[in-house]
Image (cartoon, rainbow, N blue to C red):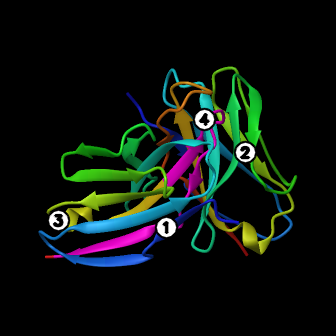
């Protein structure tokens, strides 16, 4: 079974630009979560989608948004990029939504903002 | 405010030794406590997890000890191996949300 796939793996943007990251969950998984990982803040929850609906949201500004498609694939978007947005963005899928379950992480998309 | 506090930040252990990483939490709504292992360039992978109705869970060389009254849990790696060298994260999840709170991570280095 294929794991969680994230694209692109690496990208460089400049301040003020926007970026879209993509995540394909494990087949059959309907819950997709996004986390930001930085050396200073560790792993921080961005949001979770289940059946195309955002169910939970972390404490990030509105520049961070996401969506989920009917095939459970998800995208997250960051607009008006700031230097502090440089991070590893991790997507994770879960086999069941709303019930404690294992998070299956992808390898992440490493964003550098110059 | 960090909901899950993890220590130490880094740890050096000799091969064959015991690695111990500690975490503490405050939110009594947490009911699922996993540990994740992350190698450079990879995403975190679940290592072992525990629920608060048990005080200990063992899987191979990895053991979670859980103290509900103290709101603390720890990971013990027995017979540590160089291949265990990685960053370890504890986490906690409330019973009604699929939202995980992670500790700050412990970088483990097992010396041959």
Q: Secondary structure at mark 3?
A: loop
Which quadrant, please, contains the C terminus of chain B?
bottom left
Label 2 vs label 1, nearer the camera? 1
Mark 2 and mark 1 in contact? Answer it, CB < 8 Å. Answer: no
Q: Secondary structure at mark 2?
A: strand
| Structural distance between the alpha carbons of marks 3 and 1 | 22 Å
Tell me the number on the disc at residue A76.
2
Label 4 vs label 2, nearer the camera? 4
**Reading the chain from its start, which is encountered first: label 3 or label 1?**
1
Query: Could you confirm whether marks 4 and 2 are on the same chain?
Result: no
Residue, x 18% and y 60% (percent of image)?
Answer: B78
| Structural distance between the alpha carbons of marks 4 and 1 | 21 Å
Disc 4: which chain? B
Mark 4 and mark 1 in contact? Answer it, CB < 8 Å. Answer: no
For residue A98, which quarter of the picture?
top right
Along the line of sight, the residue nearer the viewer: A58 or A49 = A58
Label 3 vs label 1, nearer the camera? 1
In the depicted structure, whether residue A76 falls above or below residue A30: below
Along the line of sight, the residue nearer the viewer: B94 or A113 = B94
Disc 2: which chain? A
Percent of width and height locating residue A19: 75, 54
Residue, x 40% and y 48% (percent of image)?
Answer: B45
> Label 4 belongs to which residue?
B95
**Mark 3, other Cα within 10 Å: few <14 / some 14–19 / many ≥20:** some
The segment highlighted magenta reads B91-111
Query: Could you confirm whether marks 4 and 1 are on the same chain?
Result: yes
Mark 3 and mark 1 in contact? Answer it, CB < 8 Å. Answer: no
Q: Is residue B13 magenta?
A: no
Q: Is residue A52 left or right of residue B56?
A: right
> Label 1 belongs to which residue?
B6
**Reading the chain from its start, which is encountered first: label 3 or label 4?**
3
């Amino acid at each position: 079974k294929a794991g969680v796939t994230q694209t692109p793996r690496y990208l460089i943007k400049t301040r003020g630009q926007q970026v879209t990251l993509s995540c394909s969950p494990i087949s059959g998984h309907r819950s997709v979560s996004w986390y930001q990982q930085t050396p200073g803040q560790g792993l921080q929850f961005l949001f979770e989608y289940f059946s195309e609906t955002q169910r939970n949201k972390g404490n990030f500004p509105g520049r961070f948004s996401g969506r989920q498609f009917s095939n459970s694939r998800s995208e997250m978007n960051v607009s008006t990029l700031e230097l502090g947005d440089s991070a590893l963005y991790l997507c994770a899928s879960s086999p069941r939504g709303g019930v404690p379950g294992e998070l299956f992480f992808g390898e992440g998309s490493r964003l550098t903002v110059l | 405010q960090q909901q899950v506090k993890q220590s130490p930040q880094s740890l050096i252990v000799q091969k064959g030794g015991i690695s111990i990483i500690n975490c503490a939490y405050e939110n009594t709504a947490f009911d699922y406590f996993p540990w994740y292992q992350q190698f450079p360039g990879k995403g975190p992978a679940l290592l072992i997890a525990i629920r608060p109705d048990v005080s200990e869970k063992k899987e191979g060389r990895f053991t979670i000890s859980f103290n509900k009254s103290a709101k603390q849990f720890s990971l013990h790696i027995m017979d540590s191996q160089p291949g265990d060298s990685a960053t370890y994260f504890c986490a906690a999840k409330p019973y009604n949300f699929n939202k995980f709170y992670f500790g700050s991570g412990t970088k483990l280095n097992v010396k041959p």
